[in-house]
Image: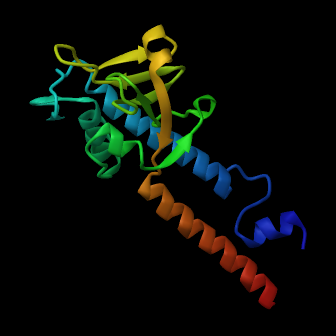
Amino acid sequence: MTDQAMAQKAGNRADDTSAPAMTQIHNFTHRATELAMTAMTLIGVHYKYGGNSPETGIDCSGLVRYVFKEAWGTTLPRTSLELSRVGEEVERDELQPGDLVFYNTRRRNYSHVGIYLGDNKFIHAPSSGKTVRIDNMEQGYWKNRFNGARRISDPGTQRQFASEKERILQAFRDDVDE
C-alpha cells in the first residue's frame, strides 16, 4: 500500500495540513500561547516568598504552579527543585514557549524557575521587593546561572494524541485484515 493510500485509509490526504502531525503542532502552539498569556497577566504582581496567588503575592514556583493550573488545569509540585524533576529535559537550543527554565540564584541548583516565552525571554517572580516581570536569558546574570530546562506535557494534548494514534493504528489494523 502506498503512503498516499495509507494516509487516505487513516482519514487524511498525504498533503493535508490537518494531518495528525500538523494538528499536534497547532495544538502545542495554541496551548503554549495559553501558558504565556496567563503568565503575562501576572506582570506586576508582588513577590512573596511561598506565595501562591496573585491576590496575596507569588514566588517563582508559585507563579509556575498558578499558570499551569489556570491555563491547563495541571497541578505541579510546589518548589523549583521539585519542578526540576517533572516533565522531560530540554536542551537550551530546543526551548519552546511554555518550557520551564531553571537557575542557580541561591548557590544551589534549581533554586529559581521561570516560564520561557520565546526569543530568549522568560517570565518569573524575581525576589523580595520586586514584581513579576519578563527578563532576557542572555543578560549576564541569568546566562551565568542557567541550570537547565524542562517541558511539561499538556494532559489534554496527550489524551488527544493517544486517541488520534489509536484511530490511525486501528485503520492500519483494519487494512491488514482486509
Residue positioned 46% across, 49% down in the render? 87
Rendered location of residue 36, percent (x, y): 40, 32
Decide: is 61 above or below 130: below
Rendered location of residue 81, percent (x, y): 34, 40
Q: Is residue 32 left or right of residue 114?
A: right
Which residue is most to the left?
56
Residue positioned 45% across, 36% down in the render? 98
Quarter assignment of residue 79: top left
Quarter of the N terminus within the rendering: bottom right
Which residue is most to the bottom?
177
Give the mark count.
0
Rendered location of residue 68, percent (x, y): 33, 44
Rendered location of residue 5, percent (x, y): 84, 69
Which residue is most to the top?
140
Colour scheme in use: rainbow
Residue positioned 81% across, 70% down in the render? 6
Decide: is 18 above or below 175: above
Which residue is most to the front?
107
Q: Is residue 57 visible?
A: yes
Quarter of the C terminus within the rendering: bottom right
Residue positioned 42% across, 50% down in the render? 86
Identify which residue, 66 or 2, lies in the foreground.
Answer: 66
Identify which residue, 88 or 14, lies in the foreground.
Answer: 88
Q: Is residue 18 visible?
A: no
Decide: is 169 above or below 102: below
Identify which residue, 55 or 3, lies in the foreground.
Answer: 55
